[in-house]
Amino acid sequence: MHMKKYSNEGLGTVYERFMLNNFFDRLIDTYALKDVLEVPLHGMTGLTGINSFHFTERNCRITLVDSRKESVSEAIDLLTELPCTGKYSVLCRQNLHPLPFPDRSFDLVWNFSALWHLENAKSLLAEMARVSSNLVLVFVTNKMQMGYFLRKHFFEPGFFRTILEKWTEIERINSLLSRAGLNLVEQGVLDVPPWPDTCFPIGKIFEKIKPRAGKSADKAESKGFWTWDIMEHYLGRDTSLKKTIERLSFLEKLPIAWQLKALWAHHRYSLFSKA
């Protein structure tokens, strides 16, 4: 259970969360969303089960589904601590296809960099299309940007033996959702901070580069110098975190084509509609 005084996810992960929340605000305002399904919920670094929490702050109800018992348990513990009582359900399903919901049960069905963990992501995409009444949204890690190369070949090559890299190909996902009868309404990039995406703790990175520097970074982190705690923000105890992140989002806000940002962006996405 989440019992720490703080939840230090790192700057990169917290930045992602705020950019996701901004994206969700736009979807809620545009499509009047009320019921949201995230499946599977495992996929992002950091706290498990917190990706969809912001929807509850906007008076939406969320349902989270995953096949991993540990992920489901962590999500339940986490959401119990947050002010969203009565606005969420968390389910564990050994098989994600079929999903245990009638057709057109949710306004939005989505996941974040989760497909590459699944053996049969193709079947799940068909189920996501079936249970959505309007929108299907899929994010993938952007393999075009430099941080992906560094993670794969230098920082964490072992990770890539545990996932199916083909599910970073957004065109593959677009094709499958189109065949399921959905219409592509928007595609682009998200999470464009002024640093590369390694998905690796900063202390570990310094240790790879220079072992003594890594130990110094770990020591500084333990003292709270690099503490980035989204729970403190959601619980109303840190009122400055959002402003700090917004100041770092200048690349995100650049008025240029998303294809240019894709050279640096950490994630790509496609938004489909049944309309």
Image: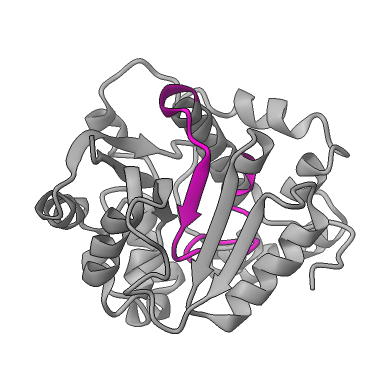
Q: Residue furthest top?
A: 255
| Residue extent of the magenta highlight | 29-54
Q: Nearer the viewer, residue 119 or 255?
A: 119
- Give the residue at the far front of this rendering: 102
Q: Residue at position x 61%, y 26% from top?
A: 246
Q: Residue at x 70, y 25 (%)?
A: 243
Report the quarter where the N terminus lies: bottom right
Relative placement, left or right, of 244 versus 15 is: right
Whether residue 40 appears in magenta in the rendering, the answer is: yes
Q: Quadrant of residue 95?
A: bottom left
Figure check: 171 above or below 216 = above
Q: Nearer the viewer, residue 56 or 254?
A: 56
Q: Which picture quadrant has residue 206?
A: bottom right
Front-lying residue, 53 or 264: 53
Residue at x 45%, y 84% (from the top left corner): 94
Q: Is most of the magenta stretch helix, strand or loop?
A: loop
Position in image of residue 30 (x %, y %): 42, 23
